[in-house]
Structure formats: C-alpha cells, structure tokens
Image (cartoon, rainbow, N blue to C red):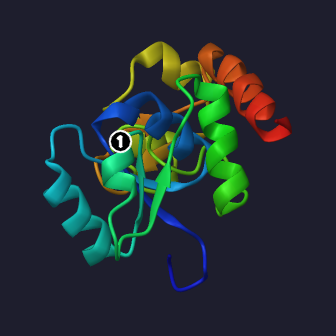
C-alpha cells in the first residue's frame, strides 16, 4: 500500500492483459513477465505491493500480501481486483499502459517532434509519460477504451 492507503500492485506473467487495463483504470500496477516466484515475492515485499497471481501456491505464501485471480475472463478479473482492493485510486487514463508511469499534460509544442503532423493538426491536448516518454492523445481508439473502462466501472 502507498502512504495514502491506495494499493500498489504487482502482476505476474500470467496477467499481462489485466495489467494493461488496471493501469488504464488508474491502479499503480507493476508487471513481471518472466520473473520467478521468488523474484516476484521479493519485489512485492520490497515495494509494498499486493501480488496479483493466478498461481495458487504463490498466492498461499506466508508473509506476502497476495490476491489470487480466479477467473480467466478479463472483466471478471477486473471485478475481482475492485472487490478486493476497492476502486482505482487515480482517475482513469492517468497512467501509461506500457510502463506504469504517470501521465502529465504536454503542449502541442512539446510533442511536435514526436507525433505525426496530422495528429498535431487534429489535436491540441496531449499527455506524456513521466517514465518512458510515450505520448498519448484522444484518437478514435480512445472512445472504445473509455466505453470499456466505463463497463469495468459499472461491474
């Protein structure tokens, strides 16, 4: 947990798709695709993270805060997280879906050399990841993502 009481999460390699959507929802979610159980446990303890896993043995480890994700369906997995840990601590679309960094506002001038010219002409609001530098804008795909996020929030 963070100092403000909001959960910090660590997802194991079986939960990559869930990780992306938890980040989009506003959860601080680290991801380890190829770490061993020992490495996952060590990192979760060191960083004060709740370990999300589908591995029953790993979830049963003592002195480790875990959440066993039982479902194979994404929407049900999101429900499991929200039921166990509460709603996302940050607004949706406030974290980088790639690296989990936070997103800050960026001006068109700030991103002019990093986005295609047609994007620059069509948009005036951008966000940049503070960790990896990825740039986000409200393209046509965002509407579908927002609908999905709304569906998760209503579950």
Residue that lies at the very extreme toward the right in this rendered image = 154
> What residue did someone put label 1 on?
55
Nearer to us in this view, 54 or 56:
56
The percent coordinates of residue 113 (x first, y second) are 31, 32
Q: Is residue 124 left or right of residue 55?
A: right
Examine the rendered structure and indicate whether residue 78 appears above or below residue 5: above
Residue in the picture at 61% in, 80% down? 5
> How many numbered marks does the figure carry?
1
* Residue drawn 40% across the image and 35% down it: 15
The percent coordinates of residue 37 (x first, y second) are 19, 52
Spot the residue most to the bottom.
3
- The relative height of residue 1 versus residue 84 in the rendered view (above or below) is below
Q: Nearer the viewer, residue 80 or 32?
A: 80
Q: Is residue 3 left or right of residue 143?
A: left
Q: Position of residue 3 (x, y in %)?
A: 52, 86
Secondary structure under tag 1 reads loop
Q: Is residue 91 visible?
A: no
User: In front: 110, or 49?
Assistant: 49
- Residue 97 seen in the current view: yes
């Amino acid at each position: 947990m963070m100092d403000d009481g909001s959960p910090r999460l660590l997802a194991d390699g079986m939960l990559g798709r869930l990780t992306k959507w938890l980040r989009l929802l506003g959860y601080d979610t680290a991801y380890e695709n190829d770490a061993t159980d020992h490495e996952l446990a060590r990192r979760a303890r060191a960083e004060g993270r709740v370990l999300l896993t589908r591995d029953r043995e790993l979830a049963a480890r003592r002195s480790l805060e875990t959440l066993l994700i039982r479902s194979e369906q994404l929407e049900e997995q999101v429900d499991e997280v929200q039921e166990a840990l509460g709603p996302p601590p940050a607004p949706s679309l406030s974290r980088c879906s790639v690296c989990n960094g936070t997103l800050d506002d960026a001006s068109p001038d700030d991103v002019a050399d990093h986005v295609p010219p047609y994007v620059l002409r069509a948009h005036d609001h951008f966000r940049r990841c503070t960790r990896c530098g990825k740039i986000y804008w409200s393209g046509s795909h965002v509407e579908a993502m927002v609908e999905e996020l709304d569906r998760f929030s209503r579950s």
